[in-house]
Image (cartoon, helix red, strand yellow):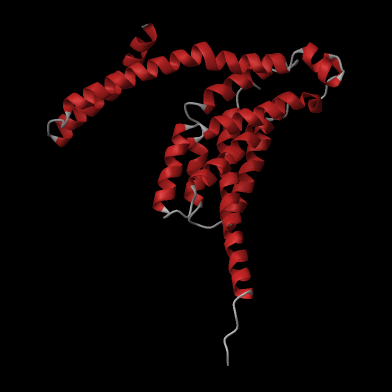
């Protein structure tokens, strides 16, 4: 009950602003007021239950998996080394799990599903719903896996982000212009309700489990990777679609029957 009450307090400023703006600026009564009130109640209850689920399940799950994958006994059984002799490549199960959890949670992201459906409708079917979702999920999986490597290796975050955005700038210059805005939006919709809690918990758990890492300095930053790499993967998806269309046109032209003289 306390969680729902805190959610109501968080939502209250939004409610006050919307009703005040409707009444004072627009100067008209709110239509379907009863439905709006019921909707806000559902939002408050749903948000409270969601936050409770994060606290009781998703955050502990991410930290638990990170602790288990970096447990000295598990690493010794997997690579045959003691903790003091481990190097970054001995944590390969961490990278595999990070890629898998980034890919799977992104496929289940409600915001991405909504954007994919809208993109498919607006493009007249040229952009596939599953094609876009898989492209974004691949980007998140690669990004989270690379972010976990950065934590294990103890490398500076800004080097990776700067290099990634340099690649984005190069891709933007040569990608189809119609795909560029969608690719940039794809980086934002991935950092939503399902993906962020798990990868944040994974980063914090990993930084606490790896010797010599700081939870504050190294534990955060995975969300930045999850936002950046989907842009790269969706731009690549657009570039591959153009190349495939050109290849199909060339094949069709090659097999086109010659006109009789």
Q: Which residue is pictured at 60% across the width and 60% down the height?
A: 244
Question: Taking 257 as reference, is 157 above or below it?
Answer: above
The answer to whether 139 appears left or right of 87 in the picture is left
Q: Position of residue 92 (x, y in %)?
A: 76, 27
Residue 215 shows in this picture: no
Q: Residue 160, located in which quarter of the rendered image?
A: top right
Q: Position of residue 118 (x, y in %)?
A: 40, 45
Q: Residue furthest bottom?
A: 261
Residue 26 shows in this picture: yes
Q: Residue furthest top?
A: 2
Q: Position of residue 247 (x, y in %)?
A: 62, 65
Between 190 and 108, the residue placed more toward the observer is 108
Between 165 and 97, the residue placed more toward the observer is 97
Question: Taking 260 as reference, is 97 above or below it?
Answer: above
Question: Taking 132 as reference, is 82 above or below it?
Answer: above
The answer to whether 125 appears left or right of 107 in the picture is left
Number of on-image labels: 0
Quarter of the image with the N terminus is top left
Q: Which residue is pictured at 54% across the width and 33% down the height?
A: 106
The answer to whether 162 appears left or right of 9 in the picture is right
Q: Which residue is pictured at 51% across the width and 34% down the height?
A: 190
The answer to whether 187 appears left or right of 159 in the picture is left
Quarter of the image with the C terminus is bottom right
Between 7 and 80, the residue placed more toward the observer is 80
Q: Position of residue 76 (x, y in %)?
A: 83, 15
């Amino acid at each position: 009950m306390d969680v729902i009450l805190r959610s109501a307090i968080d939502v209250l400023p939004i409610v006050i602003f919307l009703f005040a703006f409707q009444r004072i600026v627009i100067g008209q009564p709110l239509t379907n007021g009863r439905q709006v009130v019921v909707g806000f109640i559902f939002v408050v209850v749903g948000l409270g239950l969601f936050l409770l689920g994060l606290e009781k399940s998703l955050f502990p799950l991410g930290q638990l998996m990170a602790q288990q994958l970096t447990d000295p006994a598990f690493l010794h059984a997997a690579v045959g080394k003691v903790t003091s002799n481990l190097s970054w490549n001995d944590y390969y199960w961490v990278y595999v799990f990070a890629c898998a959890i980034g890919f799977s949670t992104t496929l289940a992201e409600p915001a991405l599903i909504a954007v994919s459906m809208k993109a498919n409708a607006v493009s007249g079917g040229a952009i596939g719903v599953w094609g876009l979702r898989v492209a974004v999920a691949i980007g998140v999986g690669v990004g989270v896996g690379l972010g976990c490597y950065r934590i294990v290796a103890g490398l500076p975050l800004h080097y990776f982000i700067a290099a990634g955005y340099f690649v984005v700038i190069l891709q933007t210059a040569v990608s189809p212009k119609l795909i560029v805005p969608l690719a940039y939006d794809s980086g934002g919709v991935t950092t939503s309700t399902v993906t962020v809690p798990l990868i944040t918990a994974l980063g914090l758990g990993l930084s606490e489990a790896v010797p010599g890492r700081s939870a504050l300095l190294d534990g955060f930053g995975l969300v930045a990777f999850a936002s950046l790499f989907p842009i790269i993967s969706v731009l690549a998806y657009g570039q591959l679609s153009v190349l495939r269309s050109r290849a199909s046109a060339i094949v069709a032209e090659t097999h086109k029957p010659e006109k009789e003289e």
